[in-house]
Amino acid sequence: MIETVLKEINNYFIKTDGVITSMEIDGFNSINTFFVGQYVKIEGSTLNDGVYKIASKVGSKYTTLEALKVEDAVAYVYGLAIPMAVLDLSTKIASQSVGIKSESLGDYSVTYDDGWKNTYRNELAQWRQVYP
C-alpha cells in the first residue's frame, strides 16, 4: 500500500540514489549505504521496479522483505526517507474499508465508492508534490 500512496501524492521522499548491477531472489548488491528498515525505490529494471523495504544487510548485499526476481540489469535505486506520518497513514488506509455506501429503493439498488483517495484527501494533500 505504501507504494500506492507515494504514487498518489507524487512524492517518494528521495534522499540518495545509486545504481544496481544485479538483483537476486532475496535482494540486491549496492555500493551505496542504506539502512535496515529503510524503503528503497528501484527504477529502470526489467522485472523489479517498485518500492521495497530492506530487511537485512551483509556487506554490500541487501535483502528485501519482498522477493526480487533474478535479473542482470542496470537499474537505479533510490533511498527513501518517508516520514512516519506517511507510513502511519498508509497503514491506516490499508487496514480500513472506507467509502463504501449503498442504498436501495424497491427493485433499484446502487453502490457508491468514493474510495480511500477521497476519504484521505486532506491528510494526503500536505505531502503531495505537484512537480517531480
Image (tube, helix red, strand yellow):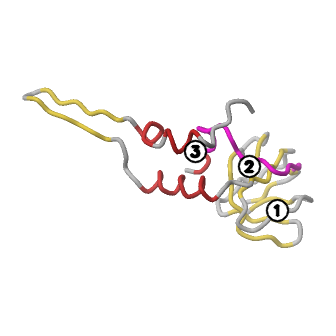
Of labels 3 and 2, earlier in sequence is: 3
Q: Is 70 placed left or right of 83 in the picture? A: right
Of labels 3 and 1, earlier in sequence is: 3
Which residue is situated farthest in the top direction here?
Answer: 108
Q: Which mark is residue 74?
A: none
Nearest to the observer: residue 31 or residue 37: 37
- Where is residue 100 drawn, in percent x and y? 31, 41
In the rendered image, which residue does mark 1 sit on? 34
> Are circles 3 and 1 on residues that touch, CB within 8 Å?
no
Q: Amino acid at mark 3?
A: Val
Q: Is 117 placed left or right of 23 in the picture? A: left
Question: Disc 3 to disc 1, how far (Cα)?
Answer: 22 Å
Q: Quadrant of residue 104?
A: top left
In the rendered image, which residue does mark 2 sit on? 41
Residue in the image at 78% along x and 59% along y:
24
Quick one: label 2, few (<14), some, or many (20+) residues within 10 Å?
A: some
Residue in the image at 37% along x and 50% along y:
97
Helix, strand or loop under label 2 = strand
Helix, strand or loop under label 3 = helix
Instruction: Tell me the magenta residue range.
Output: 5-19
Report if residue 16 lies within the magenta region: yes
In the rendered image, which residue does mark 3 sit on? 5
Q: Is residue 89 above or below residue 36?
A: above
Which residue is situated farthest in the left direction here?
Answer: 106
Q: Amino acid at mark 2?
A: Lys
Q: Amino acid at mark 1?
A: Phe
